[in-house]
Amino acid sequence: MEKQDAQETHPEISVVVPVYNSEDCIQELIIRVGGALEPLSLSYEIVLVNDSSNDNSWEVIKKAALRNTHVVGICLRRNFGQDSALMAGLRAAMGNYVVIMDDDLQHDPVFIPMLYNEIRKGCDVVYGKYRHKKQKPWKNLGSAFNDRVANIVLKKPREIYLSPYKIIARQTVLAVCEYDGPFPYIDGLLFRVTRHVSQIDIRHQDRFAGRSNYTVVKSFLVWANLITSFSMVPLRLATILGLVSSATGILFGIYILIAKLIFPSPVQGWTSLFVSIFLLGGVQLFSIGMVGEYLGRLYQNVSKQPQYVVSEMVGR
């Protein structure tokens, strides 16, 4: 009896899904996850985190949790963002292995057994890598740019693609959940605690229903979170730009002085002067902005801004 209770408390696989305005996808998602895992006779749970959706997503989740004992629902008091919602789901997940996937079924649950088999070989994290992504071109460009930045900032292997579809071993999940700052970035936290990472090839599916909630602004905020939370590169870049600008100004000043001594005539070139002023002013504003971004994040960390606030939980 005690062994059975332990299995029920700690399922083999938890599937954590952040939900935002996806009421039409939720039931199909639950059905497909069950269809992928039940043939394996593995105990599992589905943790659905409603990130304060504007539609009826939370009502759909509550009804699903009442009908299906595998479903756990968490509702956040306001929209905290995808990574904060994932942190709420990771802390609630009880599985020995935790799968993270999106709510729109572009991540097909049929690949969960493949991820599971790969991670049981000894890795801490296994990513699903898409050969072809069914999304808008600007999102592909943004993903490629973010991947290049991650190579530098996180020092991840170049062949590893930071996919939002992945499986994580429980000990790694617990290590990630120790982070209590207000700006979580799951992939950054994973590479902070482990380098035992692998990946498998999967297919990227068409969205089941609705439209994407990701915008250019949100993509930029994800990049900004990566670059400022896990690296000093922006501050060092600002320092280098300042040094280059100063050196350029000194050299230009020497040139003007020599030209004045050799050719005693009024200095010409108001256009170049204004360009120089605007260039230096831009460098200064950029540097001040980056310092301000770091100071703002430091202030919010010190003031203990929460990652998320749970208003309601159903299931389990």
Image (cartoon, rainbow, N blue to C red):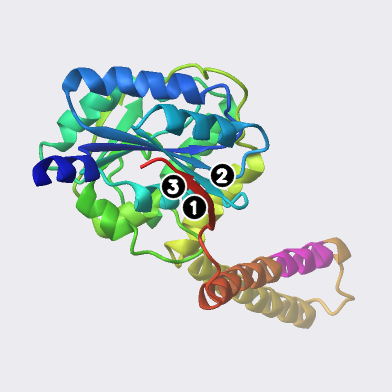
Image marks 1 and 3: residues in contact by CB distance under 8 Å: yes
Q: Are marks 1 and 2 in contact (CB under 8 Å)?
A: yes
Using the numbered discs, state the Cα–Cα distance from disc 1 to disc 3 in whole angstroms. 5 Å
Residue nearest the viewer, comparing 177 with 224: 177
Query: Marks 1 and 2, how far apart in space?
Result: 9 Å
Examine the rendered structure and indicate whether residue 107 appears above or below residue 235: above
Q: Is residue 276 left or right of residue 48?
A: right
Magenta run includes residue 279: yes
Q: Give the residue displayed 47% in from the left and 44% down from the top.
A: 146
Q: Which residue is mark 1?
A: 84
Lower sequence index among marks 1 and 2: 2
| The disc label shown at residue 30, or none | none
Question: What secondary structure prevails in the magenta region?
Answer: helix
Quadrant hosting residue 39: top left
Nearest the viewer among 45 and 250 is: 45
Q: Which residue is mark 3?
A: 86
- Between the residue at mark 2 and the residue at mark 3, the CA separation in whole angstroms equals 9 Å
Q: Amino acid at mark 1?
A: Ser
- x and y percentages locating residue 150 in the rendered image: 40, 49
Q: Secondary structure at mark 3?
A: helix
52 lies left or right of 313: right
Residue located at (49% from left, 69% from top): 236
Q: Which residue is mark 2?
A: 51
